[in-house]
Every structure is written in C-alpha cells, then in structure tokens.
C-alpha cells in the first residue's frame, strides 16, 4: 500500500509513541525523515535514531524518544506543509512559534534545518512541521 504523506506518518508515529509512554518507535526509512530526525536530535527533542537494514533495499528507522522527569520532550508535533497544500515562507515572513520556544523545521535549498538555523543562513523554504 502506498503512503501519500510519509513525513506525516513519521510525526504521527512519534506522537502516538509519546502518548503511550514508549521509549522507542520504528518507522520506514527515507532521506527526508533522517534529515528531519537530525534536526530533532540537534535541538534536543529526541535522544537518538539509527537506520536498520531489514533486507536489500528495505530499511527502517529506530527512534529513541526523550523524556524529562516522566514528561515527553515533545509536547506538540504537527505537520504544516501537506501534500494537498504546500506552505512556503520567506525567512523574513516566518513567524516565531510559541514566542521562540518551539521550532519549525524547513526544507531549504541548503538542506533541512530549523527556523533558527534558516534565519542565521538567511534562507527560506517549505515549512515541513512545528515542534514544541
């Protein structure tokens, strides 16, 4: 069965695993997903992630979720740009999320990065998701 929004599926798996208080979750692997997970790791929302090869050409990502005093590090994670409605933003027009406490993950010409990294590099792009 084909999936119309693989990144949305990854975010839902993370949201559901946090809701069930699990320490790990698994998702099919792709380059975009690993780039988004790199940003989440750099910003301190997840502990770690790794790619496992199941068989030739088929891989999965195992994500180690982060908790602080029993509470999930990710309070809210939501997809912004969807397959039916892409959302692009110039860096000067990109609003702060939760007054700068949350992050937005962007896909830019220089790669996938957080909103603060995009502001430092002065590049805009597609707003993939918001994390708080």
Image (cartoon, rainbow, N blue to C red):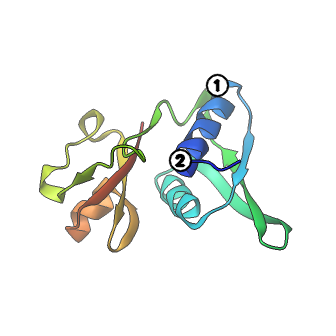
Residue extending furthest toward the front: 1
Q: Residue at x 24, y 70 (%)?
A: 121
Q: Residue at x 32, y 56 (%)?
A: 126
Q: Nearest the camera: 126 or 101? A: 126
Image coordinates for residue 31, horizontal then vertical, percent: 57, 67
| Outermost right residue | 55
Q: Which numbered tag is attached to residue 32?
A: none
Answer left or right for 119 relative to 69.
left
Of helix, strand and loop, which one carries label 1? helix
Q: Which residue is mark 1?
A: 19
Residue at figure coordinates x 13%, y 50% from the top left: 93
Front position among marks 1 and 2: 2
Locate residue 33: give its quadrant.
bottom right
The C terminus lies in quadrant: top left
Circle 1 crowding by C-alpha within 10 Å: few under 14, some 14–19, many from 20: few
Q: Is residue 69 visible?
A: no
- The reply to whether residue 33 is visible in this rendering is yes
From the top left corner, tell me how far across and down residue 62 is, in percent.
74, 53
Q: Position of residue 29 (x, y in %)?
A: 67, 60
Give how far apart the Cα atoms at labels 1 and 2 are.
21 Å
Specify the quadrant of the image occupied by residue 109.
Answer: bottom left
State the residue position of label 2. 5
| Earlier sequence position, callout 1 versus callout 2 | 2
Q: Is residue 45 above or below residue 91?
A: above
């Amino acid at each position: 069965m084909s999936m119309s929004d693989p990144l949305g599926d990854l975010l839902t798996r993370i949201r559901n695993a946090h809701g069930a208080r699990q320490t790990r979750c698994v998702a099919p692997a792709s380059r975009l997903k690993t780039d988004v997970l790199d940003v989440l790791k750099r910003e301190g929302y997840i502990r770690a992630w790794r790619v496992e090869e199941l068989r030739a050409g088929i891989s999965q990502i195992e994500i180690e979720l982060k908790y602080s005093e029993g509470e999930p590090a990710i309070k809210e994670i939501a997809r912004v740009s969807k397959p039916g409605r892409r959302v692009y933003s110039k860096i000067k027009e990109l609003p702060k999320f939760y007054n700068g406490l949350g992050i937005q993950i962007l896909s830019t010409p220089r790669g996938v990065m957080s909103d603060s990294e995009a502001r430092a590099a002065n590049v805009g792009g597609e707003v993939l998701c918001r994390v708080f």
